[in-house]
Amino acid sequence: MSSVQINPQILADATEFIRADPEGAAEFLAEIDPISWMHHIELKTEKGEPIEFRDHKPLIGIYSDFHPDQVYQKAAQIGITETAINKILWLGDHRNLTFIYVFPTADDVYKFSQGRFNPVIKGNFYLRKRMRSSDNATQKQIANSWIYFRGAQKETQAISIPADGLVIDEFDFAPPDILDVFTKRLEASRTPLTWRFSTPTIPKYGINAWFEQTDQRHWLVKCDRCNRWQRIDFWRNVRARKGIHRFVCWKCGKLLQRRSGIWVAKYPTRATDAVYDARGYLHEPASGLRGYFVNPLAFTFITAEKKWQTWVKAEHSSRAAAIKNFYNFDLGVPYVSGESLITTDTIRNSMKPDFDVQGFNVFGCDQGDILHWVVKHISPDGTRPIVAFGVTNSFEEAYTRFVEFACRLGVIDALPNKHSARQLVQKSHKRLYMAYYKDQNEASKERIEDKKPDKPTNYSHSKQETQTLLLDRAETLDTSAKEWIDGRAYLARPRDSQAEDVQEFIEQMAAMVRDIQEDSKGIARVVWVKTGPDHYRHADNYASIAADLRTIGPITDLSVGGSIANILPQELDFGFGPMKPDDLMPRESDFGISTFKDF
Ligand SMILES: [Zn+2]
């Protein structure tokens, strides 16, 4: 892999050679540059048309980039798949390499192979000679190199052979655990190559999160009147003139010449190319992550007027995902709608140390490497502050917190340690429930458009196990998010608290983003996607369910000394000694009043 870098000296020699011996120069250039190779072998598109770069200018720079770790955040249908395929065909034709090319599904592999790859090979004399077994949809051989096409849906699609290169197409739509399996195939390679690309989905997730870590290359164009270099932005550079939308300089309004652009890295030091000496020996290996934002508006086959019409259509569409799809697929940028978004500001701005001590407490606990627990207080006025939270690695200790805060009910994550969770549930005398998130595939069958507005519950009781709840993941996370956005839920701490655990709580609460995804049939579903550690968010979600289990009817009925005393027996025994109904309510002494002041 180390000698794929184009040596500038050889390139200069070849260029001088062109006048003296054009044929020989073309052959020579084909050896060192993929675009020259494509011209030399007369490569055509799947429709038999010549490959052109006039309307695809930004692709030229991408063709000559062989950095080993590349990330492309892109719009749909602008030629990145073809570019990657042609680059690995060129590499494979010149060296003995093995590539794995991953599409989201096996169906995508089949469609690509039959519809796009095979016609290109069949229509090309040179490649027909160089390639064997081209009838096999999932593996192709060129010279002594192999390309394995795989879907990312199941682990069985992963292969056991070692590889030199991994290309992941539509990265955001492939399950991360399957991608890990493919990545392991590169372990034996001395200089592995990993190229990832995708239309983005939501900010700071998937391809967008990767792109953020790269040198972030953007296609900048220069206004030929005011000389301003600029990125082409749909909202800033598109203006109507005599009823037709055009790309104009955002500063002076002159029509933009989009072809006169260059790739510019925002953080050039974050990725360096390999350095070779004059004889072609590797002097310094490549480093960092190379990233491209492949802006569709930089491609001249795309017109401002057409794009504008697509936007107008999306804006007036009744489809749940129409606007999001416009951003993701038509602009190549991530998108999240404002609704249901908990930000660190949402949490921070609603913080206050006080709450109505009347009411009762519920408990939520998330399992992972350690346990994250929260105590949510349900006040008679309907507010639901988090009054205590923490982490522990012991189930016993989590249970002690549950008892200590006199929580009326609690919900604990059933997985991964089902056995320990069940022990607590049994010990709790029906005050603790364990909960599973329902199978994602199950949930995906529901069309959100078909959703009834007044679905009675977003959880159900398991028929197989006692004290066990099955939660609709998307719906319960929607409901608990709403509590925070409405301001009913808040963190009972001073707003300016800089305590480390408070910061952690806030960050984890904001570490999920709500996305609407469409399957191949256009059926939309809500998916909550994790953008960082999100344990408290889940613990809070479980506590919300616990609250809902016991707040049927007007909440004022539950105030201490009110009707609750009438509906409960005078003395209760939950297995840790007799209690009065009032004992179920939080008291200052339970928390230690001084700690409230310390918050
Ligand atoms: Zn200008």
Image (cartoon, rainbow, N blue to C red):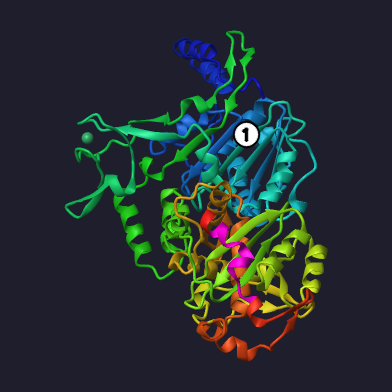
Given residues 261 and 382, the one toward you in this image is: 382
Residue 473 appears in the rendering: no
The structure residue drawn at horizontal position 71% and vertical position 40%, both measured from the top left corner, is 183
The segment highlighted magenta reads 584-596
**Vertical placement of 247 versus 591: above or below?**
above
Q: Does the magenta stretch include residue 594?
A: yes
Residue 430 on image: x %, y %: 75, 78
Count of picture labels:
1
Residue 320 appears in the rendering: yes
Q: Residue reaching furthest bottom?
A: 566
Given residues 599 and 524, the one toward you in this image is: 599
Q: Quadrant of residue 66?
A: top right
Question: Which residue has dot 1 on it?
Answer: 89
Near mark 1 (Cα within 10 A), the count class, few <14, some 14-19 or many ≥20, is: many
Residue 518 on image: x %, y %: 53, 63
Given residues 3 and 584, the one toward you in this image is: 584
**Vertical placement of 8 versus 531: above or below?**
above
